[in-house]
Image: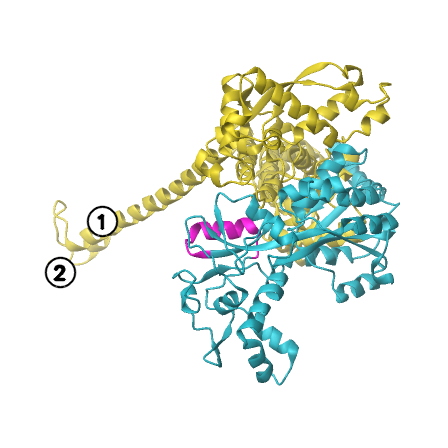
Amino acid sequence: MSLVKLTASALAIAAVSATAAAARDNVQIAGSSTVLPYASIVAEAFGENFDFPTPVVESGGSSAGLKRFCEGVGENTIDIANASRAIREKEIQACAEAGVKDIIEVRIGYDGIVFASQLDGPAFTALEASDVFNALSDKVLKDGEIVDNPYAKWSDFNADLPDVEIVAFPPGTKHGTREVFEDKVVLVGCEQTGAFEKFMEANGGDKKAAEKACISLRTDGKAVDIDGDYTETLARIDANPNGVGIFGLAFYENNTDKLKVATMGGVVPTTESISTGEYPVSRPLYFYIKKAHIGVIPGLKEYASFFVADEIAGPDGPLAAYGLVADPELAATQSAVDAEAVMGGM
Amino acid sequence: MTDASANTPATPRPGKHAGSLLEQNARTLRRNAAERRFRAYGLSAIVIGVTALVVLLASILSQGLPAFQQTFITLEVHLDEAKLDKNGNRDIEEIKKVSTFGYAPLIKTALSTRAGELGISSEDLGVSDKEIAAMISKEAAAELRRFVIANPDRIGETVEFEFLATGRIDGYYKGRVTMESAEKDSNISPGQLQFADALKEGGALSTHFNWGFFTMADGSENRPEAAGIGVAMLGSLYMMIIVLVLALPIGVAASIYLEEFAPKNWFTDLIEVNISNLAAVPSIVFGILGLAIFINYAGLPQSAPIVGGLVLTLMTLPTIIIATRASLKSVPPSIRDAALGVGASRMQSVFHHVLPLAMPGILTGTIIGLAQALGETAPLMLIGMVAFVREFPAAPPEGFFDPASALPVQVYNWTTRADPAFVERASGAIIVLLAFLLCMNFLAIILRRRFERRW
């Protein structure tokens, strides 16, 4: 009969589990894989220096994180969403519909996006946004006409670039990095080459459609989307001597013995050149806090204040050492966190 | 053939059947060749399989074995009262206010002093003060702070500690980092490596077995050297307990009812078909189910072993039911008939005679189901267990509701990190996981060999 007892106790555990779920005492965070290293560094230091438990940080991408963030208010939803892009209007609406009305936006600093090839691979010393557009866009401008991308080598359109096959590994569409890559590189290149105007003409002056045409990448195997993490991009580049990958600055800084970085407009990406704005391709990193959870989940506000404190997110802190470009307006962010200022005065 | 040919009347067709046993005709040659070819195919299939296994194991072992070794730097740290307890009243709350950033300079001073004693000149090697401090893991400051808070009475004394060296220095002694790669590396310089070599000569730096790999929690990207699988192993253990406690009784009860008591009709047939189908359902589907039911509907916490255990229970149940039913079926009906014949009730015949005889098969099926569940990652992703978790879960039953990681998830997590030192950690965790799986499968084989009865 011990079997019956076992079953009964098992059922009892299952029943208890439904009720004992109350009172979560650790902060839960999810979102961008770019912000994850920073968040885990902060979470670790936070757990060491405070009496609160170390927050749990999950990865999964900015969009996935914000989606979970907007699922509602309550202990079985996450408290903080990390994002490598600003929250979208649509997401704010979705949040509001689920009852997540007061959101605190915290900008933690900037991240550079770099192009890099194998250490022994070709050197890209004269890369411009227009070159990236020419290399990777589906349709380009050639002799004043919009044509299907005919280029096979980098030197085909810019003699200063290496005479090697075009193979690039941009991040997949679920990544926040992809959006910055599209907005700050491909689109800029599209305008520089003049293709943007042609697209405008072709689409009857529809700006949205023209932008969409600009950022659609070629599908003939020369631009391979990487849906995984930067380690996957690194593995692809390892296997492909001519491959060019797109990384976050921090990832490159940790793998300088394997990667050769490309300059953009003649500027080498470093935390300095990005903070001065010389290096053009950078983006702010954020995290979003549910205000309704402050005071309910212990340590939530302390974690946020600790994150943006000078000793952490400042120019000499561990985050900067890892590759984060410190925000010059950090003081404003600190006071906003202290005041629990919610977004857009909604 | 021979019978048939013997029965047929005379005039055998010459050349067709007539032939010498010693001389092979064309057809025999063809058949023999076909057999040889088939053997060659079979052999090459095995060779391919074994090679793949050897390559896989060799790469995992060569990458992962270094994870069990770690480089340490032994230092005597002076716990400066002026820095750690300004008022000198040993008030624990005041000591706690000194953050790990306040402890880092103490360690740097200790290392510089040690280097001075050993006659290492940092100027000659071109190593800056900041670089010297960077040679010791950032975990060291946390370790020191924990020690001071636990032993406030030792402030003012000089205590010997064994600190972790930073991941790059550790990699240097494992062949991952070389002088050439250090030139290009922004995180380490050749000077620092020479400094480390000098420390090693002086006996302050050594590489030995790393228990921390088994006992410590995950580390952030800044300190791969301090990352361990402690939380992941505990999380996996908790989940396996839950799976065992839930899946074994439910699975066995269901199988006994279906096999021994249930009437044979279209309804039980339907259930049977569904159980077989469930066994083949991709595990991610159970993850989605778990998210919808256990987290969103029942309100269980995210990242907790209880949810992981429940999801894996659902996944393991069909395996256990199928194995249990098979072993119940293999108990001959004569056993049941004999028990019923001497007046036992049906329940007595099942619990006193059939079930004990079927037990080895049931346990084997359960262990294989558990091993399968132990290596599962996909459903855990959806319930938030693929996470950076540093807090150890409490003892059960409360611990079932605390966030935890799991072994396969930890492997996945580490492979996505930027620092190359995590690749070694991931392979090390794979070795541990494989060792667990081997043990479980071995146990299953022993149970089957020792206790299984055949009729």
| Nearer to the camera, A331 or B320 | A331
Q: Is residue B10 left or right of residue A200?
A: left
Q: Mark number for residue B13? A: 2
- Residue A233 picture location, percent across and down: 52, 53
- Residue B380 picture location, percent across and down: 66, 47
Q: Chain of mark 1?
A: B
Compared with residue B436, is residue B40 higher up or lower down, i.e. above or below? below
Name the kind of residue labelled 2 in the image: Arg
Range covered by the magenta-colored residues: A227-243
Hue used for the chain lettered A? cyan
Label 1, label 2: how far apart the Cα atoms are:
24 Å
Name the kind of residue labelled 1 in the image: Asn
Q: Quadrant of residue B412?
A: top right
Pick out the residue farthest to the front: B123
- Residue B403 picture location, percent across and down: 74, 40
- Disc 1 marks which residue? B32
Q: Is residue B257 visible?
A: no
Do pointers 1 and 2 mark residues of a single chain?
A: yes
What residue is shown at x 73% (from left), y 14% (from top)?
B157
Residue B71 in the magenta stretch? The answer is no
| Nearer to the camera, B328 or A314 | A314
**Quadrant location, the N terminus of chain A:** top right
Q: Quadrant of residue B307?
A: top right
> Which of the two marks, 1 or 2, is nearer to us in this view?
1
What residue is shown at x 55% (from left), y 23% (from top)?
B209
- Residue B315 picture location, percent across and down: 65, 47
* N-terminal-most mark, 1 or 2: 2
Which structural element holds mark 1?
Answer: helix
| Nearer to the camera, B289 or B296 | B296
Pick out the residue farthest to the bottom: A204
Q: Residues within 10 Å of mark 1 (few under 14, many from 20)?
A: few
Hue used for the chain lettered B? yellow
